[in-house]
């Protein structure tokens, strides 16, 4: 690979080519897609001029779907087949969903992640999310007039590995190339920080429909450094609706109501919550399917009272995040409010009191995450160079392994800057032992049973030796998306057996391929065409990158023979590109990638050297 | 991929290997390197290139986290000089230090069971001051005297003190939530 596109400031390899990239905020309640157009980040609208897409999917018996407003309109009359807030189920098993009993769904407890029974069969939350992403992809491609190079998808900062992996799987299923999973508060910080040229320590308080994040960042000279993050991935505006819903049931003395009535009252509860941001009291009326009438008045004082414990649940993580960052409330220069739920007056009040300052509300809390994601997508797609910025994000929850007695030994601490890796050595405890099992968990608690189990895998083929003889080095790598992979190597025997394990809750490649096949049964030709196009784009990108790299310093870094080899590889790829065989193009692309690896590594070394030149000189002066 | 892992952390950032370092310069060097190698700069390139970038960025993070913490830096310097600390196995301490440790532990335990947050915070401050004294000693042993055996001893002691600090923080966290 190579082709490190390290352009000089202000110089881009191909200045006229704009790669189409979007930022997507895949929300619990609403989703949005945004892009950078003429240097401005803008939210893309549907044909009716609406920016928000309700995150609601309704399944029909023939497998077709309604997504967004049409689905939302049917949620009361068809509650089993209309899935709302699927984000809450991402990467979650049934036992992780304590409130599942009161939801109008029929859950199927599949291994790793729940599924929901619909007329079109059992659907995983990943598939539901993919339907939402597909609609946003189509919206973007129509609006921008071309195929997307990739997307930045935002996730709550406090999402664990299982939830992140599920989100990435959903994007793959929707045919999106994920440039990065970006933490929602970090996306908001980018939008806010660039807009306001902010410098200093900021907190981002992000209360969405179903998730809460607090991130503490230091903004300085173009670097967005996340110092600490905390949150609750099962707390959001939905829970405030639910408190009102319970209050309605109690006041109206209702019990054992039908799913469609539950859905109706939840909708009324949400409307009441929204109205209470502007009015001191609201009237709630509904006619249930049994003919019963609901007619109640809810005042803001009662609303504040019944949701006080929810508000407090956001302040504990805020305190922890500050402590982890090693900071006091006084160190925080501003608190950026994100997420529609932060419109609630009691939230504004509580946050103001906690941070001892007026929260910053000058951005649209519904859109700021998507806008920030679009700005980052534009950078990641390679549309800017030189003057861009750097995001240093962290892993929200510690990673560990199970040790004797069901205890957790932490391998990677929470709030470590990513990407991060740690290696741990293991040995055998019995003579002739040839296998050992490793259990990876995520969380802060001491007992394995209190943490999230991410993966259990067995290392086999260890050469039989006396107890303690084998040396197995297990490496835990967390990438820039916050996703974990584990590899292991047996060193002492001289044989290096290496395995790479992806955590098991996610979907296997086969499963994704299967889902893709079912969803596109009739579109085989389309798939082949897409594969060819993707391969052509990839090959074109590679050629372009190598040419720019050769132009820049090919003469200096390559011998004549090495140069000839790369030229030959490029020629072969070009001739493959003249045909229509996507496999041939793929093969030549991989070959050229391989040939150019040394060149890439040398360029990387050189650029690191260059970054340090100034320091080296100083060193000499000492 | 030839990441030069033989390069030590100090060399990576182009600073002289010493306990006393210019923290601002270290941070700037770290940021300059990340600006070149961070995976965000390679997201649209091929898989191999992304992998290379991830390895470099991981290495830069590791090096930076090691050097920015006084204890990590001391431990690493000793390692470069062929002195391993064996923190887990070597627990030989001077009787005076062990005595002091027991007193600390008692004080923390008492404050904890009395749910005395101000006292815990006071202890935390005291501990921080004592750790600073130790760190000054470390600077002398490592940079001036090059007395690595004494330095290793201080590192082991600091490790104990760090555990005390974690204990206090843990107690505070429990009392506040």
Image (cartoon, coloured by chain):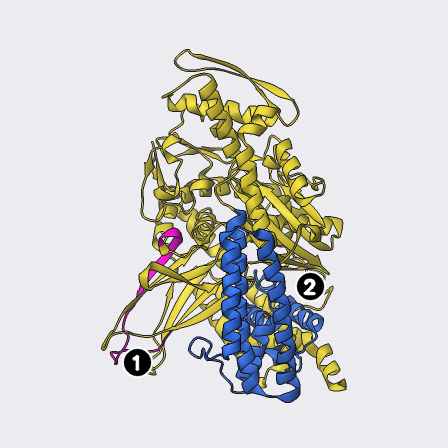
Chain colours: A yellow, B blue
Asked whether residue A466 is drawn in magenta, I would say: yes
Residue A441 percent coordinates (x, y): 40, 57
**Residue A12: mark:** 2
A386 or B55: nearer the eye? B55
User: Are the numbered discs 2 and 1 placed on the same chain, yes or no?
Assistant: yes
Q: Say few, some or many: other residues with alpha carbon within 10 Å of mark 1 (under 14 / 14 to 19 / 20 or more).
A: some
Q: Is residue A419 visible?
A: no
Image quarter of residue A621:
bottom right
Residue A596 percent coordinates (x, y): 53, 75
Q: CA distance from mark 2 to mark 1?
A: 54 Å
**What are the residue bounds of the magenta stretch?**
A449-473
Image quarter of residue A604:
bottom right
Q: Is residue A227 left or right of residue A592?
A: right
Residue at 60%, 57% (x, y): give it: B121
Q: Secondary structure at mark 1?
A: loop
Q: Is residue A258 left or right of residue A539?
A: left
**Residue A469: mark:** 1
Identify whether A598 is placed above or below A237. below
Asked whether residue A155 is drawn in magenta, I would say: no
- Label 1 resides on the chain identified as A
Residue A315 percent coordinates (x, y): 58, 43
- Label 2 resides on the chain identified as A
Q: Secondary structure at mark 2?
A: loop
Of the numbered discs 2 and 1, the one sitting upstream in the chain is 2
Residue at 52%, 22% (x, y): give it: A268
A221 or A234: nearer the eye? A234
A617 or A169: nearer the eye? A617
Residue at 44%, 25% (x, y): give it: A263
Residue B166 percent coordinates (x, y): 52, 62
Image quarter of residue A44:
top right
Q: Is residue B141 visible?
A: yes
Quarter of the rendering occupied by the C terminus of chain A: bottom right
């Amino acid at each position: 690979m190579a082709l490190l596109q390290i352009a000089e400031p202000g110089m881009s390899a191909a200045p006229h080519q704009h790669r189409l990239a979007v930022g997507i905020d895949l929300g619990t309640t609403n989703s949005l897609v945004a892009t950078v157009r003429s240097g401005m980040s803008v939210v893309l609208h549907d044909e009716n001029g609406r920016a928000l897409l309700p995150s609601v999917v309704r399944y029909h018996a023939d497998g077709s779907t309604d997504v967004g407003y049409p689905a939302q309109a049917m949620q009361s009359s068809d509650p089993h087949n209309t899935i709302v807030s699927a984000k809450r189920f991402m990467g979650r098993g049934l036992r992780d969903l304590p409130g599942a009993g009161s939801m109008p769904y029929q859950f199927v407890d599949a291994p790793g992640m729940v599924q929901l029974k619909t007329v079109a069969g059992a659907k995983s939350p990943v598939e539901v999310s993919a339907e939402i992403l597909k609609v946003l992809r189509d919206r973007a491609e129509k609006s921008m007039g071309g195929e997307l190079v990739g997307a930045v998808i935002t996730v709550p900062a406090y999402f664990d590995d299982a939830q992140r992996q599920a989100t990435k799987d959903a994007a793959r299923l929707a045919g999106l190339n994920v440039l990065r999973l970006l933490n929602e508060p970090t996306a908001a910080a980018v939008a806010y920080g660039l807009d306001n040229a902010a410098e200093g320590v900021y907190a981002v308080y992000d209360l969405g429909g179903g998730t809460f994040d607090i991130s503490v960042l230091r903004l300085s000279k173009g670097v967005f450094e996340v110092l600490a993050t905390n949150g609750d991935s099962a707390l959001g505006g939905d829970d405030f609706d639910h408190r009102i819903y319970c209050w309605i049931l109690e006041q109206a003395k209702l019990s054992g109501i039908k799913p469609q009535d539950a859905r109706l009252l939840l909708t009324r509860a949400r409307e009441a919550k929204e109205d209470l941001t502007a009015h001191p009291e609201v009237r709630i009326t509904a006619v249930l399917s049994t003919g019963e009438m609901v007619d109640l008045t809810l005042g803001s004082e009662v609303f504040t009272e019944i949701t006080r414990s929810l508000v407090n649940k956001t302040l504990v993580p805020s305190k922890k995040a500050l402590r982890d960052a090693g900071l006091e409330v006084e160190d925080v220069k501003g608190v950026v409010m994100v997420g529609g739920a932060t419109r609630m007056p009691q939230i504004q009040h509580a946050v103001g009191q906690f941070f001892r300052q007026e929260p910053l509300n000058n951005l649209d809390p519904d859109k700021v995450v998507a806008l920030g994601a679009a700005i980052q997508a534009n950078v990641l797609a390679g549309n800017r160079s030189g003057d861009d910025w750097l995001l240093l994000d962290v892993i929200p929850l510690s990673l560990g392994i199970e040790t004797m007695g069901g205890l957790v030994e932490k391998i990677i601490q929470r709030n470590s800057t990513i990407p991060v890796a740690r290696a741990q050595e293991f040995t055998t405890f019995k003579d002739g032992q040839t296998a050992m099992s490793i259990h990876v968990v995520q969380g802060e608690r001491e007992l394995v049973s209190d943490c999230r189990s991410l993966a259990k895998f067995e290392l086999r083929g260890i050469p039989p030796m006396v107890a303690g003889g084998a040396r197995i080095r297990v490496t835990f790598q967390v990438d820039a998306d916050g996703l974990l992979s584990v590899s292991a190597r047996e060193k002492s025997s001289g044989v290096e057996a290496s395995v790479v394990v992806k955590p098991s809750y996610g979907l296997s490649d086969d499963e994704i391929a299967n889902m893709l096949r079912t969803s596109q049964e009739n579109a085989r030709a389309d798939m082949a065409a897409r594969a060819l196009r993707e391969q052509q784009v990839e090959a074109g990108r590679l050629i372009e990158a190598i040419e720019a790299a050769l132009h820049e310093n090919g003469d200096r870094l390559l011998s004549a023979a090495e140069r000839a080899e790369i030229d030959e590889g490029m020629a072969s790829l070009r001739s493959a590109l003249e045909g229509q065989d996507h496999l041939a193009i793929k093969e030549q692309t991989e070959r050229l990638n391989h040939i150019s690896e040394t060149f890439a590594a040398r360029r990387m070394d050189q650029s690191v050297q260059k970054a340090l030149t100034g320091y080296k000189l100083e060193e000499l002066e000492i | 991929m030839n990441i030069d892992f033989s390069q030590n952390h100090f060399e990576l950032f182009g600073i002289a290997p010493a306990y006393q370092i210019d923290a601002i310069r270290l941070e700037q060097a770290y940021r300059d390197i990340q600006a070149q190698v961070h995976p965000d700069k390679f997201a649209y390139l091929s898989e191999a290139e992304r992998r290379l970038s991830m390895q470099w960025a991981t290495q830069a993070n590791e090096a930076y986290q090691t050097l920015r913490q006084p204890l990590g830096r001391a431990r690493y310097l000793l390692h470069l000089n062929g002195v391993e600390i064996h923190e887990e196995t070597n627990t030989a301490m001077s009787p005076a230090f062990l005595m002091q440790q027991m007193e600390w532990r008692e004080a923390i335990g008492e404050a904890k069971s009395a749910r005395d947050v101000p006292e815990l915070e006071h202890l935390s401050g005291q501990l921080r001051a004592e750790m600073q004294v130790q760190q000054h000693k470390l600077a002398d042993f490592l940079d001036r005297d090059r007395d690595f055996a004494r330095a290793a001893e201080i590192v082991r002691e600091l490790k104990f003190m760090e555990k005390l600090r974690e204990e206090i923080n843990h107690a505070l966290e429990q009392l506040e939530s």
